[in-house]
């Protein structure tokens, strides 16, 4: 689908909007009709171990389900490091989130109730951009981060060779070779994030084993972050199945984490 086009979808139309000039710098926005009360908005960050063959359509079912629940979504695409380098990836994810500042004036979305939700590698990107944005005094500030089997400890994931060398390939080297890059990119090394987080894992996940998230949860709580941990039956893709119990629990807990906003 071309950027800046519009297509019909149920229950809310999909608007595909460019946040940059590169063909992969776009997102798909689902919002309530004009005149509606502003809705919470979830930024969806897809995974795929940072490889270009995986695209934002991975998150389409969740975007559609969020719309049925009355929640807006901004499902983003971004340049992947296998073709464009790590800095392009992190720059794009931040630019896509910041672009919501422009969309907030045009569409009924409540940026005070902004949630960043990422699956797998997207969980790492969502948590990392939250840390970056919260360190900035101005602009968009997320209220909640949701990690769906996120790669939250990059050094450990690289040590285990998860994704067939995906971490070292994405970041450009190993953790001992690039300690500064890993420190900036790995959510486990950015604690405390200073934001409520919902950390979701599945029992039979072989792509990102749940103990990666378990150790992150313990460290984040020890650092003072407010953490809700959800663990249930299923595999890596159960977490992005809108018909799963895990996803239903995730929706309930991420809205609860907004508090009175």
Image (tube, grey):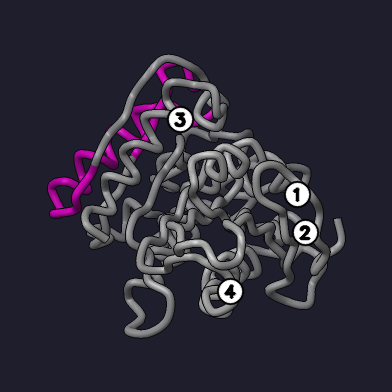
Q: Which residue is mark 1?
A: 52
Residue 250, image quadrant = top left
Of marks 1 and 2, which one's residue comes earlier in the chain?
Answer: 1
**Mark toward the viewer: 4 or 1:** 4
Q: Which residue is mark 3?
A: 247
Q: Identify the residue at horizontal 62%, vertical 40% (top origin).
A: 64
Residue 6, image quadrant = bottom right
Residue 53 showing in the rendered view: yes
Q: Are marks 2 and 4 in contact (CB under 8 Å)?
A: no
Of marks 4 and 3, which one's residue comes earlier in the chain?
Answer: 4
Residue 68, image quadrant = top right
Task: Relative to 162, say whether 9 is above or below.
Answer: below
Q: Are marks 1 and 2 in contact (CB under 8 Å)?
A: yes
Residue 48 showing in the rendered view: no
- Asked which secondary structure carries label 2, the reply is helix
Q: CA distance from mark 1 to mark 2?
A: 7 Å
Q: Which residue is mark 4?
A: 103
Query: Mark 3 packing: few (<14 Cα in 10 Å), some, or many (20+)?
Result: many
User: Residue extending furthest bottom?
Assistant: 138
Direction from residue 149 to residue 78 in the image, left or right: right
Percent from the top left, x then y, of residue 212? 37, 34
**Mark toward the viewer: 4 or 3:** 4
Q: Which residue is mark 2?
A: 83
């Amino acid at each position: 689908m071309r950027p800046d086009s519009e297509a019909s979808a149920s229950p809310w139309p999909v608007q595909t909007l460019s946040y940059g000039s590169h063909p992969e710098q776009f997102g798909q926005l689902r919002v309530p009709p004009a005149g509606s009360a502003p809705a919470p908005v979830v930024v969806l960050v897809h995974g795929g171990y940072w490889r270009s063959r995986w695209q934002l359509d991975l998150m389409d079912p969740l975007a559609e389900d969020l719309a049925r629940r009355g929640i807006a979504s901004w499902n983003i695409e971004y340049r992947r490091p296998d073709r464009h380098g790590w800095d392009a990836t992190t720059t794009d994810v931040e630019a896509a989130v910041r672009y919501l500042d422009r969309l907030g004036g045009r569409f009924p979305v409540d940026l005070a109730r902004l949630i960043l939700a990422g699956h797998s590698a997207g969980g790492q990107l969502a948590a990392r951009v939250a840390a970056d944005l919260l360190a900035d005094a101005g602009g968009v500030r997320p209220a909640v981060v949701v990690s769906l089997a996120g790669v939250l400890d990059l050094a450990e994931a690289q040590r285990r060779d998860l994704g067939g060398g995906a971490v070292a390939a994405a970041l450009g080297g190993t953790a001992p070779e690039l300690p500064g890059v890993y420190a900036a990119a790995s959510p486990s090394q950015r604690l405390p994030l200073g934001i409520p987080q919902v950390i979701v894992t599945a029992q039979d996940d072989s792509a990102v084993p749940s103990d990666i998230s378990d150790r992150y949860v313990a460290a984040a709580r020890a650092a003072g972050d407010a953490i809700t941990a959800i663990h249930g039956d299923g595999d890596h893709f159960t977490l992005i199945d809108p018909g799963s119990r895990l996803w239903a629990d995730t929706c309930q807990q991420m809205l609860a984490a907004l508090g009175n906003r």
